[in-house]
Image: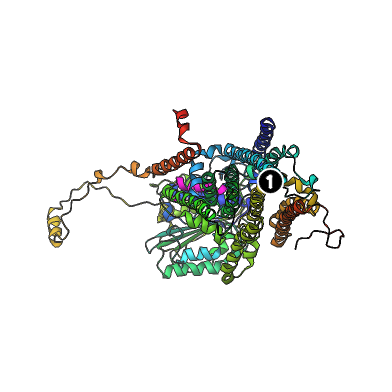
Amino acid sequence: VCTSRFWFNYRHVANTLSVYRSVKRLGIPDSHIVLMLADDMACNPRNPKPATVFSHKNMELNVYGDDVEVDYRSYEVTVENFLRVLTGRIPPSTPRSKRLLSDDRSNILIYMTGHGGNGFLKFQDSEEITNVELADAFEQMWQKRRYNELLFIIDTCQGASMYERFYSPNIMALASSQVGEDSLSHQPDLAIGVHLMDRYTFYVLEFLEEIHPASQTNMNDLFQVCPKSLCVSTPGHRTDLFQRDPQKVLITDFFGSVRKVEITTETLSLDRDVAGVESKFPEEELATEPLKYAEQLPVAQIIHQKPKQKDWHPPGGFILGLWALIIMVFFKTYGIKHMKHVF
Amino acid sequence: MAAPLVLVVLAAVTVRAALYRSSLAVFIAERVEVATPLNAWKRVVEGLALLDLGVSPYSGAIFHETPLIIYLFHFLIEYAELVFMITDVLTAVALYLAIQDFNKVVFKKQKLLIELDKYAPDVAELIQTPMEMHYIPLKVALFYLLNPYTVMSCVAKSTCAINNSVIAFFILATIKGSAFLSAVFLALATYQSLYPLTLFAPALLYLLQRQFIPIKLKSKSFWLYTMQYASLYLCSLVVIICLSFFLLNSWDFIPSVYGFILSVPDLTPNIGLFWYFFAEMFEHFSLFFVCVFQINVFFYTIPLAIKLKEHPVFFMFVQLAIISIFKSYPTLGDVALYMAFLPVWSHLYRFLRNIFILSCVLIFCSFLFPVLWHLWIYAGSANSNFYYAITLTFNVGQILLISDYFYAFLRREYYLTHGLHLTRQDGTEAMLVLK
């Protein structure tokens, strides 16, 4: 979630998009990501490189590529929508891409960035969400069994105040700065004219670039990212509500979509079980010929079939009738004797 | 006379071509004074595009042209500018030939009446001479082609030009005396916009006069000829409508074209009188007032036919003017058509009473139309009342123009038969007034 708009908050959008990019790179599909952005950077008239959002100095990394799917954009990023997404109390007409369809086995990562203060986070320069509201939202999620484990990362000024009030189990929280400290931005880019990223997220991004789906890096390493010497502010974390030891929690549990696949070399015989299974289900279906997959049209042909645009032509009968009438009128006026001039 | 006509035609074509190439073309095409929902070029293009997509163009309320226009423009849409320029030229040439013939008829009739001693002795200065009548056809063609109204209407590519052309051919056919052709062209004109139906009466009167059939209600030959002409006209109309059915295999065009003209559902402002009135009206009165307004157009035929039965061409002129004032979606192109006839009656100049004021009114209103439109729509500091005021003034000016000419014509006829210096019974000078 990026909670700011306007050109000078470029870095918040770049932060969010960098985390989005890392998360997608590690395997989480768009259907499992709810991205809330003001989305006014790439096409902003002040953007000297339109349709791009860069996250490194010297424009090394364009995080606004072809496959960025923003679910809540511009004025839809409100406190109410954010809380509704979290708690699932959404109007029935909301499309699936805008819902958080999680259940009690889901691990959720929530990343928020923007401008904040002691106990609140500013949304779109017009409203705030308080840490109490956030804590209550998480409790609603716990009671509705909408998460298994939740990782909450926040990169704002005085960000640690936002996780002080959590009271639901299985929540781990990280913030970029303590109460009373400001989160600072990384270097500005002189070509674009604004600061491209915040320090904390910059170092988190550097850290995440080294993670791949099979890596065994755990949360303790994430807690070490961005010490005070690099970040000027003191990042904080909170693990007391979390039931597992952070040492044993893999980064990819939250940031990536990693399936536990075991490759086995044993062989299993299924014959007896198959017969047993078949006898349980009598043949009730009609003996229709099953369609072979190969018999369907190739996909390329189906996609590119467009209705042929036929040009309209007046019907032949009409043209014939019209010209017959015209010729009749002509000869009625001027007499048949003129026909000899025609021939 | 061909060379000056060719020169005039060339000048007109140059002016139009120059305007087509300039940036004014887009501006003029959007003006409501020349493009109404009935004959705007944008709608023709839209209808043809709908047809290419496989949808009937009459399905929405966009397209209100007849199927013959669809057929015409289906093949000629890339040459649209050329088509409209040629249409204007054809109209002017048709009017030129028609007025040439008409002048001959007028002169012959005048000679006959002089020999029959029907004229009073002191009206020598009122008699038209061939010398002054020599340039009238050229002036008519000039008035039509170089009239700013016609030029704007042509640049806007409004199909009113095609309607004008058909009416011009109808007038040519009538004056030449061919009943068949005149019935066919009148049927075409009625088929396109309903109102030329009222021109049936003057055409009939002219043809009867030409055949020397006296206009008496008891005369058998009168009724025979009337029936012949009427049946020619109605048959051609029916044939054309049935033929249009075969273009799209549907009768959709009848409510879209004639239903639209008669029931006036679209109240886009134009230079007519319908839009404001019906915008203000309550729903349950609108049917009644639509009927009243439409009857108003057709109604003047009867008294005019009675009064002007000896002068059918003047009747035609007045009728054309009444159509273009009172029709449901008038444009400046319709105004231009009857204004082209004004040189034919230039000998009435000495009897016209209000001509200076009227010409000033018409010119000022023409300039004020775009100004008040801009003030209303773009600046927002005026409202529809302003534009309607100018519309009203323009139409009042037109009506006064027609009634001035009408009065002048009748006055001249009276003077011709009763002499220029009228005296009352006691010998003092009398003044002729229109009661």
How many numbered discs sit on the rendered protein? 1
Q: Decide which of B355, A96 is in the foreground and name it.
A: B355
Q: Is residue B431 above or below residue A144?
A: above
Range of residues picked out in magenta: B42-57
**Res A129 seen here:** yes
Q: Chain of mark 1?
A: B
Q: Decide which of B399, A194 is in the foreground and name it.
A: B399
The answer to which quarter of the image holds residue A295 is: top left
**Res A124 seen here:** no
The answer to which quarter of the image holds residue B177 is: top right
Q: Residue at x 40, y 63 (%)?
A: A148
Q: Main secondary structure of the magenta part?
A: helix
* Left or right: residue B39 compared with residue A27: right
Q: Decide which of A296, B142 is in the foreground and name it.
A: B142
Q: Mark 1 is on which residue type?
A: Phe
Helix, strand or loop status at disc 1: loop
Q: Is residue A177 magenta?
A: no
Q: In this view, which residue lies farthest toward the right?
A: B428
Q: Residue at x 52, y 66 (%)?
A: A134
Q: Is residue B96 above or below residue A89?
A: above
- x and y percentages locating residue B54 in the rendered image: 43, 48
* Left or right: residue A80 compared with residue A303: right
Residue holding disc 1: B341
Q: How is the image coloured?
A: rainbow
- x and y percentages locating residue B378 in the rendered image: 70, 54
* Left or right: residue A245 compared with residue A115: left
Q: Is residue A52 above or below residue A236?
A: above
